[in-house]
Amino acid sequence: MDNGQMPPVQNTIDSPVSQTASGRPMIQQVQAAPAKKKEIVGLIKTIVIIVVSLIAVTFIGLFIWMFTQYNEARSDIDGQILVATAAARDEQASKDEAEFLEREKYPYKTFLGPVDYGELSFEYPKTWSVYISRDAANGGDFEAYFNPVQIEPISNTTVNALRVQVLDADFESVVSRYQGALENRERPLTMGTISVNGTTANLYTGIIPGTELSGAILVLKIRDKTVVMRTDSTLFRADFDKLIETIKFNA
């Protein structure tokens, strides 16, 4: 070799350590995870927390809403039950009272009219009071009034359960008084016939002529007299029909 120098001896063993230009070993550094990856992971965690929070808030809100609806529905149902119970109680009380009043009418009393006027008789509730305003002791007309508890003042505006007249007039002249009312369409009055103690009688229903009252009138012939029986209100119609069935007289 030139200059008498030995050539540099090369290291035949591969070294994992890199060297700098000056021959010093270069130390390799392990790089940390990229900051961007950390940011993505943090963002995902934040999103997950927000979503979970929203879901929790939604469920809480839904629970509160359903609980409120349940309470309102329950309150409404409870209110309806209370109203229905009260209505049923009132209805039962009214029914019991009506049945009591009906039972109180029994046993019925028997009314007897003047002997000389055919001795008209019929049964009426014992809870009714009777007032005879004309007894026909000296002839003329017979008049009697019936009403629960007490008799109302006699007029065309007051209501009594029953008015009874035995008129000293023939049947034809009495029924003619109602003919005009039958033809009056503004104040309806209808007529039918029924059998009373084997005798045909006229039964008028509707607005009573000369009054504003709605009721029923029975006109019946007894010998040379005419009986007029009237109820001033439809409230007493059932009692009126029932007592008509008990009418007896001497023809």
Image (tube, rainbow, N blue to C red):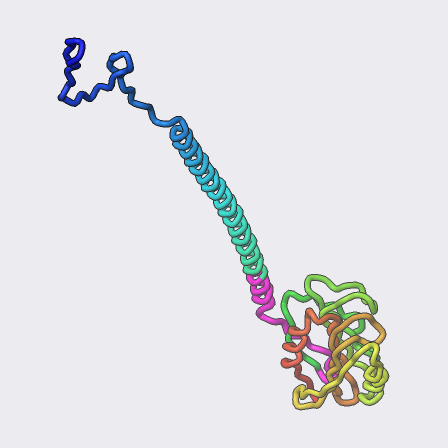
Residue appearing at x 73%, y 85% in the figure:
118
The image quadrant of residue 102 is bottom right
The image quadrant of residue 171 is bottom right
Q: Is residue 143 left or right of residue 243?
A: right
Q: Is residue 244 above or below residue 29?
A: below
Residue 67 location (% of width, % of height) = 48, 44
Depth order, front residue of 198/213: 213
Number of marks in picture: 0
Q: Is residue 18 above or below residue 88?
A: above
For the C terminus, the quadrant is: bottom right
Residue ranking furthest to the top? 4
For the N terminus, the quadrant is: top left
The image quadrant of residue 188 is bottom right
Q: Is residue 174 left or right of residue 75?
A: right
Reply yes or no: does residue 116 show up in magenta: yes
Q: Is residue 7 left or right of residue 219?
A: left
* Magenta segment: 95-119
Residue 24 location (% of width, % of height) = 25, 12
Depth order, front residue of 223/9: 9
Reply yes or no: does residue 61 show up in magenta: no
Q: Is residue 169 visible?
A: no
Residue 19 location (% of width, % of height) = 25, 17
Q: Is residue 85 above or below residue 121?
A: above
Q: Is residue 188 visible?
A: yes
Depth order, front residue of 171/114: 171
Residue appearing at x 84%, y 81% in the figure:
184
Residue 159 location (% of width, % of height) = 76, 67
